Image (cartoon, rainbow, N blue to C red):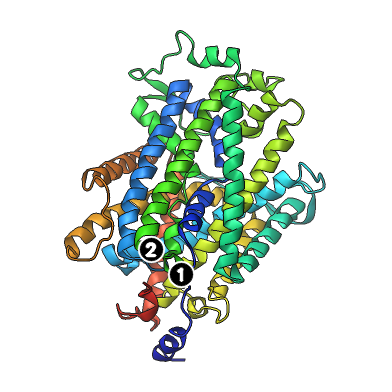
Amino acid sequence: MTKAETSQSNTEVRLEQTLGLFSSTTIVAGSMIGSGIFLVAAEIARITQSAWLFLAAWVVTAAMTMIGALCYGELAAMMPKAGGQYVYLREALGPLWGFLYGWTLFLVIQTGTIAAVCVGFGKFLGVFFPTISSSHWLWHIAHVPVVQVGPVALGNMEIGVNTANLTGLLLVILLAAINALGVRLGALVQNVFTTAKGLSLLAMVALGLTVGRHAAAIHANFGAGMEAGWTKLHPLVTRANGATTMVSVVVLLAVVQVGSLFSADAWNNVTFTAGEVKNPQRNLPLSLALGTGSVLTLYFLISLAYLLVLPLHGDPHGATVMARGIAYATDDRVGTAVLEAIFPGVGTALMALAILISGFGCANGMTLAGARVYYAMSQDGLFFRSVGRLHRRTRTPVAGLAVQAAWTVLLCISGSFGQLLDYVIFAVLVFYILTIAGLMVLRVKRPDAERPYRAVGYPVLPVIYIAMATWICIVLLRYKPQYTWPGLGIVLLGIPVYFFWTLGGRGLPPRDHPLLEID
C-alpha cells in the first residue's frame, strides 16, 4: 500500500474525541500516583537527615512539576494532536528530537514503568495470596551477576517467570485488551481507580494528621534543636562502597529529586491522548493544572503525615516500625510502616490493598497513553506502519497497544525494568528541559500561531524550570553518574535507528498529514 493509499484509508477512521475534563484529569493524576510515594520517602530521609529538608524536597518537586504542567498546557492547547510531547519536540526542535523521545519512551520510560508497576502489583497481591511471590519460580532461565563498568553496576537480574511477574505480565495483557476495546472503557477504568486511590490517599492523610499522630515522633522530628541546616554542609554517599562527600543544601536537594521528582512523573501522559480529548484547547491545560496540583498537594500532606507518625531517623536493626523510623522502614515501605503504627497487625494488608488499587490505575493510564505516541510516530514514518492504523470499530491503536504490551512482557521476564528505569531518570529530565525550551523556540518561530492558552509566568517560570532542572542534571552527572551516563547511552542509541528509518525510504509525511490535524 502506498503512502497516499494509507492516508486515504486512514482518514476514514479517526481518533474519537470522547475524553472530557474529568477523564483527562484522572489520566494526569492516575498516571502520577503509583507506588513511589509509599517507597521513596525512606531514601529521601536517609539523604536529607532533617524533617525540614525532607519536606523541602517535596516543595522543590511540586514547584518544578507545576511549572512544567503550566508550560505544557500552552503546547497542548496549541497542538492538540495525538502524541503530545513527541509532537512538541518534533515541531520545535526537529524530527530527530521527537524520535529520540519516542524511542526512549518505548524502549524504557513507558514500558519499563508499566512493567515495574505491574510486577509490583503481583508482589503486593502476594500479601493476600502467598503463592504469588518473586521467589516462587515457574521457569528460571538465568541469573545475571553484577558487572562493574566504571561507576555503573550492570546486571544482578533474575531472568524467567515467577508467580509475581507472571501476575504482572497477565495484567499487562489485560490492560492492553481493555484499552483496545475503546477509549471510553479505558477512561472508565481510569476514572474508577483514580477516584479510589485518591480517596485512599486522602484517608491516609486524615489518619496521619489525626489519630495517627505520635508525640515522640513529632518531638524527634520538629522538637528543639531539629534545625534544617540550611547553611551547613551535609554528608552524601556518592559510591556503592559507602564513600561520602560533604555537600551544600542545594546539592543535597538536587540529588533527592531522583526519588521525589520522578515519583510525581508521568503527568505529561495526558498530552499523548490529545487527539481524543473534547475541547482540547480548554481541557488539556485545565487537566494538567488540576491533576498535578491535586496530586502534589496530596504528596506533601502524606509526607507531613509520615513525619507526624514516625520519627525520621531510626535504627536499621530496630524491632518495631517506630524503632526503624522512616529512614529504615522495612524494604523502604514507609506507607506500610505508617499504617502498621496506626493499625498494628492489619497495616500491611491495608497498604497492600491501597497499592493494588494505585498500581492498577497507574498502569492503565500509562497503557492508554503510551500507544498514542507510537501511533503518531508511525504516522511520521518512524515506527512500524501497522501501529499507525486505528481499529475501524473501536477507533483505538490496537497494534500500538499490542507492540507496547509485547515489549513490556519481555521486560517483566527479563527482570531488567528496575535497572533500566534508574538509567533513564536523567534522560527524562533532559527531555523536559528540551520541551520547555521548545515552548520558547515556538514563541519565536511561530509568533502568530493560535495559542488558546498562554503559559502563566512566561518567560520567567520556564527559565526558572530550565535553570532548576539543568542544575539537577549537573549535580547528578557529578555525584550520581550511575543515573546519568547509561541513560544518555540509551538515548543516543536512537540516533542510528532514526537514520535507519528515514534513509529506509519511509521519510516524514507532509505537514498537513490528515491524521495529525485532529481538532
Report x, y in % for residue 46: 52, 26
**Front residue (pair 101, 76):** 76
**Mark 1 or mark 2: which comes first in sequence?**
1
**Front residue (pair 80, 427):** 80
Report x, y in % for residue 379: 42, 77
Report x, y in % for residue 419: 56, 48
Q: Residue at x 39, y 31 (%)?
A: 253
Q: Residue at x 46, y 64 (%)?
A: 273
Q: What residue is disc 2 on?
A: 280
Residue farthest along the top direction in this orientation: 224
**Residue 181 shows in this picture:** yes
Dot 1 falls on a residue whose secondary structure is loop
Q: What residue is disc 1 on?
A: 17
**218 sits to left or right of 280:** right
**173 sits to left or right of 49:** right
**Front residue (pair 264, 481):** 264
Q: Do the residues labelled 1 and 2 touch (CB within 8 Å)?
A: yes
Q: Is residue 78 placed above or below 70 in the rendered structure?
A: below
Report x, y in % for residue 50: 46, 20
**Front residue (pair 384, 303):** 303
Q: Residues within 10 Å of mark 1 (few under 14, many from 20)?
A: some
Q: Is residue 298 placed above or below 322 in the rendered structure?
A: below
- CA distance separating discs 1 and 2: 9 Å
Dot 2 falls on a residue whose secondary structure is helix
**383 sits to left or right of 36:** left
